[in-house]
Amino acid sequence: MKVNKPLIALAAYAVVSAAMAADTYTIEPKHTYPSFEADHMGISVWRGKFTKTSGNVVLDRSAKSGSVDIAIDPASIQFGLPALDEHVKGADMLDVTQFPTANYKGAIVFNGDQPAAVDGQLTLHGQTHPVKLTINSFKCIVNPMLKREVCGADAIGEFKRSDFGVAYGTPKFSPLVKLQIQVEAVKQ
């Protein structure tokens, strides 16, 4: 059997180039805060955020693909009312002792050259369900302080907390949770 060395070299170059085309970005925890809105008996909307996140985003702009893998510390929840924070962390709701981590993993969907959505799976309270995020804005710059590329996005989505076994107060409290996520990530 005759070996076609130029063809093998070209194939090897294509594999290496494809592998190198994807860039990994590490979540910047001081600039990333998943926030949310939740009903309070139909008379007001409570807003809160999680202050501790970590993870990575992988982008392959040439292939128009990517992935997201984010960990959220549910014990970092803040509503601005410490008594409510403690209640939500307790066994009635998030049960952060038994479920100390929430995760979101998904595939980035492009529209043309821009990331437009994430088709993902949220694991919360020990249960995993699909949650789609719509990316409202996305931009990358060379951060003047870090001297490295930093990408940022604003994304929204929603889910029913009762689907994840967090049904406290329903039906008096609507189970719908609206997400608003600001994220910044530094290229590695």
Image (spheres, rainbow, N blue to C red):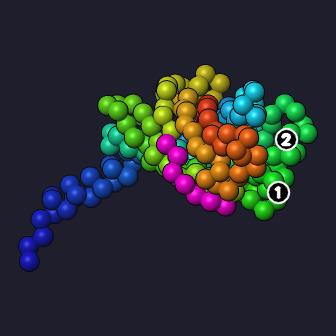
- First in sequence: mark 2 or mark 1? 2
Q: Which of 83 and 138 is in front in this view?
A: 83
Q: Give the range drawn in magenta.
A: 126-132
The residue positioned farthest toward the left in the image shown:
2
At x 57%, y 46%, the residue is 56
**Secondary structure of residue under mark 1:** loop
Q: Which of 157 and 57 is in front in this view?
A: 157
Q: Is residue 165 left or right of residue 139?
A: right
The percent coordinates of residue 158 (x first, y second) are 57, 39
At x 32%, y 43%, the residue is 63
Total number of numbered discs in the rendering: 2
**Secondary structure of residue under mark 2:** helix
How dense is the environment of label 2, judged by Cα within 10 Å: few (below 14), some, or many (20 and up)? some
Residue 53 can be seen in this image:
no
The percent coordinates of residue 95 (x first, y second) are 79, 56
Q: What residue would you read off at disc 2?
A: 85
The mark found on residue 100 in the picture is none
Q: Nearer the viewer, residue 63 or 177?
A: 177
| Disc 2 to disc 1: CB gap under 8 Å | no
The mark found on residue 91 in the picture is 1
The quarter of the displayed image where residue 26 is located: top right
Q: What residue type is labelled 2?
A: Asp
Q: In this view, does 54 lie to the left or right of 113?
A: right
